[in-house]
Image (spheres, rainbow, N blue to C red):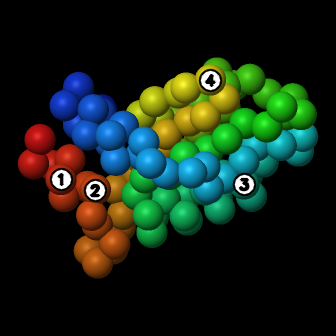
Amino acid sequence: MENLRGKQKHYLRGEAHHMRPLFAVGKNGLTDEWLTQLTGALDKRELIKVNILQNADVTTADVKAAIEQNTAITVVQTIGRVLVLYLPASHEEDRHYSLEVAKL
C-alpha cells in the first residue's frame, strides 16, 4: 500500500469521477481469486472503482481492510458502497496515472 499525499489523492479522485465501477463484491464476498483478478485489472488500468452490491455479506470497511491488508492496492476514496482503488502498473507502457501522481 502506497502512502499518497493529499494532492495525489485529489488528482486520482478527479480522474475516477467519470468512471463506472468495474468490479463488484456480491454474496460470495471476498475471495483470494477475486483479489487476484482485481490486482491483475489494476496492473493494466492503475485506477478502478469497485461496487459493493446490496446482497453482499460484507461492509465497505471490511472490503477496504481486506484489500489493504492482502494486496499492495491503495484505497483512494470510499463513497457509500463504492471504493476507488489505485495501484501503479508494473509495465512501463501501462503507466498513465502513476506518472502524473509522481509529479505531484
Q: Which residue is mark 2?
A: 97
Instruction: Mark 4 or mark 3: name the one nearer the start of the chain.
Output: 3
How far apart marks 3 and 1 lie (CA) works out to 28 Å
Instruction: Mark 3 or mark 1: name the one nearer the start of the chain.
Output: 3
How far apart marks 1 and 2 lie (CA) works out to 5 Å
* Cβ–Cβ under 8 Å for marks 4 and 2: no
Who's the residue at 41% across and 34% down the image? Answer: 76
Mark whose residue sits in front, 3 or 2: 2
Circle 4 SS class: loop
Mark whose residue sits in front, 4 or 2: 4
Circle 1 SS class: helix
Circle 2 Cα neighbour tier, 10 Å, few/some/many (<14 / 14–19 / ≥20): some
Circle 2 SS class: helix
Quadrant that contains the C terminus = top left
Mark whose residue sits in front, 4 or 1: 4
Instruction: Mark 3 or mark 2: name the one nearer the start of the chain.
Output: 3
Q: Which residue is mark 3?
A: 34
Circle 1 Cα neighbour tier, 10 Å, few/some/many (<14 / 14–19 / ≥20): few
Q: Amino acid at mark 3?
A: Trp
Quadrant hosting residue 22: bottom right
Quadrant hosting residue 41: bottom right
Who's the residue at 28% across and 56% down the image? Answer: 97
Q: Amino acid at mark 4?
A: Gly
Mark whose residue sits in front, 4 or 3: 4
Q: Amino acid at mark 2?
A: Tyr
How far apart marks 4 and 3 lie (CA) works out to 21 Å
* Cβ–Cβ under 8 Å for marks 4 and 1: no
Q: Is residue 25 left or right of residue 63?
A: right
Mark drawn on residue 80? 4
Q: Which residue is mark 1?
A: 100
